[in-house]
Amino acid sequence: DIQMTQSPSSLSASVGDRVTITCRASQSISAYVNWYQQLPGKAPKVLIYAASTLQSGVPSRFSGSGSGTHFTLTISSLQREDFAMYYCQQTHTIPVTFGGGTKVEIK
Amino acid sequence: QVQSQQWGAGLLKPSETLSLTCGFSGGSFSAHYWSWIRQVPGGGLEWIGEVNHGGVTNYNPSLKGRATISLDTSEKQFSLKLTSMTAADTALYFCARADCTNAVCPFDSWGQGTLVAVSS
């Protein structure tokens, strides 16, 4: 299986901060990475697909980059509604796998 | 606008079989894969498997052959059966659509989740 190692596992930040979350794949997966946000008690919601394409309806403060084995999700100016869990996912190889998640908390 | 709803029994005894169904409306059933994902309480996401419009299935080997996913195109529903349930299978189960009109198949629509508990 392809392992997706996500870091940090949690972070504390303030409204307005720039936040970056990293995901490393155990082998090269081109740009087959998607990023999800999960609010408590809710299903995940796709933010970014194909490593860097913003899903329709998602605010432009979210962006993604990377290819191969190193990927990042950036929130340019954290808003109150962004405090949530974030997961990366690879769809390059079966089984589909997810990173362990990053909890973004209010400082 | 794609909408989904999932249903099935939420409390099982050890060794029983989990049966969940997910219905989608408002979108095409073709050109997509239909997946099941689970999340242990307070934990991460585990992909269980998928089925496509043609009935082709893929499964996570971690389930050791216990999962079966099937599709009913006439009803726009797909189902999960997971046999020999144990306490380790206690989790929140989601259905999701993988939009494979895009090569990377992002999971763009999810069910509301069903909490499944296994206890004697």
Image (spheres, rainbow, N blue to C red):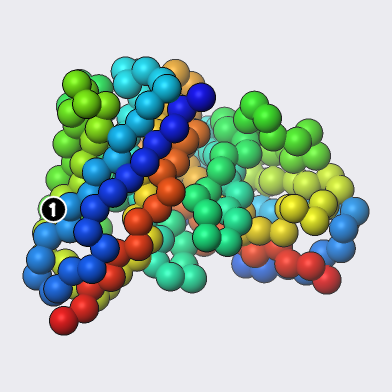
Residue ID for mark 1 = B65
Q: Residue furthest right?
A: A16
Q: Residue at x 46, y 67 (%)?
A: B43
> Position of A101 compared to B70: left or right?
right
> Position of B117 compared to A70: left or right?
left
Residue B38 higher or lower than B97, as above or below: below
Nearer-the-camera pick, B108 or B66: B108
> Position of A93 compared to A71: left or right?
left
Residue A99 higher or lower than B75, as above or below: below
Give the chain of mark 1: B
Residue type, mark 1 in image: Gly
Q: Residue at x 39, y 67 (%)?
A: B40
Residue B111 higher or lower than B26, as above or below: below
Nearer-the-camera pick, A1 or B70: B70
Q: Where on the picture, by quarter, is residue B11? A: bottom left
Residue B15 seen in the current view: yes
Q: Residue at x 10, y 66 (%)?
A: B16
Image coordinates for residue B18, horizontal then vertical, percent:
17, 58
